[in-house]
Image (cartoon, rainbow, N blue to C red):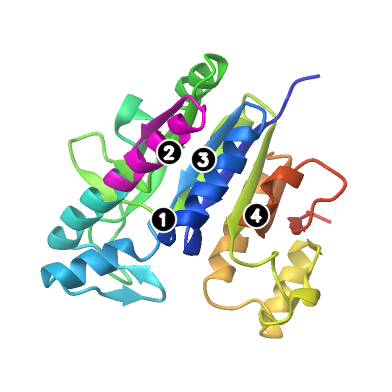
Amino acid sequence: MEESIKIFKIGGRVIEQPELLRSFLKDFASLPQPKILVHGGGRSATTLADKMGVETKMVEGRRVTDEAMLEIVLMVYGGLNKKITALLQSVGSNAIGLTGADMNVMKAHKRAPEPVDYGFVGDIDEVNAEGLIKLLEDGVVPVMAPLTHDGNGQMLNTNADNIAGSVARGLAKHKKVELYYCFEKKGVMVDPDDDSSLIEKITPDEFVQYKAEGIVVEGMIPKLENAFKTINAGVEKVCIMHYSGIQQVGGDMFEGTTLCLK
């Protein structure tokens, strides 16, 4: 039976704390292949921007990327990508760091300036699924940064959740695919401060209900919207989970929120 390609997306606290990152990458490296890692940037770009006197502008939780901020995210996210790749190599995982420009793996267009001008932010148009599959077949682990390009020499800042979803949808046209969003909580919670309030399964109708009740709010809304879009495109499984639980993926002890169509 064909083995599913497993895509893991990490960000936030895992990226920001070196010991957490090392622990996660060690667990990730121990998983059987084929697998892909997509990473965000945490607050590292904001930290460097502050040091360099570049103002950080956010709209609805999303970074406005003007020319000065684009230079910073290219430095920070590109450097972080190579750091993660080196750490994976140190624990025996033959990883390759990729932006969207490498191997033309992801092309995007600059987002339209209406209703909000986000600057050099990219919305993904194409994923080079065949190129990624070839790497996987050769035993290589792609590590994907939150950066794309437009095909005309312009790099673009691109949300890591969107990259993970787009890669999953692109690969699902050719292979079985599972997608796991890993962050600081066990999954989607009724009460973020109560670890016993995990919602183990969410359907589209339940998602609408949770939004109306104020259970699903802020950044979790676009994450779940992207997740349901991914399931509708043929990805076999999409889960939101705690970053420490990746060794339980596929097992009876798995804990997290699974997105279901019904």
Q: What distance separates the C-alpha of mark 1 from that of mark 3?
A: 14 Å
Mark 4 and mark 3: span between their CA atoms?
Answer: 15 Å
Badge 2 crowding class, 10 Å Cα cut-off, few under 14, some 14 to 19, many 20 or more, is some
- Determine which residue is flagged by label 1: 159
Q: CB of mark 4 within 8 Å of CB of mark 2?
A: no
Dot 3: within a 10 Å radius of its alpha carbon, few (fewer than 14), some, or many (20 or more) residues? many
Q: Quadrant of residue 60?
A: bottom left
Count neighbours of disc 1 (C-alpha within 10 A) and say few if under 14, some if 14 to 19, many if 20 or more: many
Q: Nearer the viewer, residue 197 or 127?
A: 197
Farthest residue to the bottom: give it.
Answer: 213
What residue sits right under mark 3 in the picture? 37
Question: Marks 1 and 4, Cα distance to the nearest angstrom?
Answer: 22 Å
Is the C terminus in the top left, top right, bottom left or bottom right quadrant? bottom right
Residue span colored magenta: 79-99
- From this viewpoint, is residue 193 visible? yes
Label for residue 214?
Answer: none
> How many labels, in total?
4
Q: Reply above or below: 189 against 79.
A: below
Label disc, if present, on residue 244 of the rendered structure? 4
Percent x, y of residue 220: 58, 69
**On screen, residue 172 above or below 231:** above
Instruction: Locate the N terminus and report the quarter of the image it occupies.
Output: top right
Q: Of callouts 1 and 3, which one flags the residue occurring earlier in the amino acid sequence? A: 3
15 or 136: nearer the viewer: 15
Name the kind of residue labelled 2 in the image. Answer: Leu
- Amino acid at circle 4: Ser
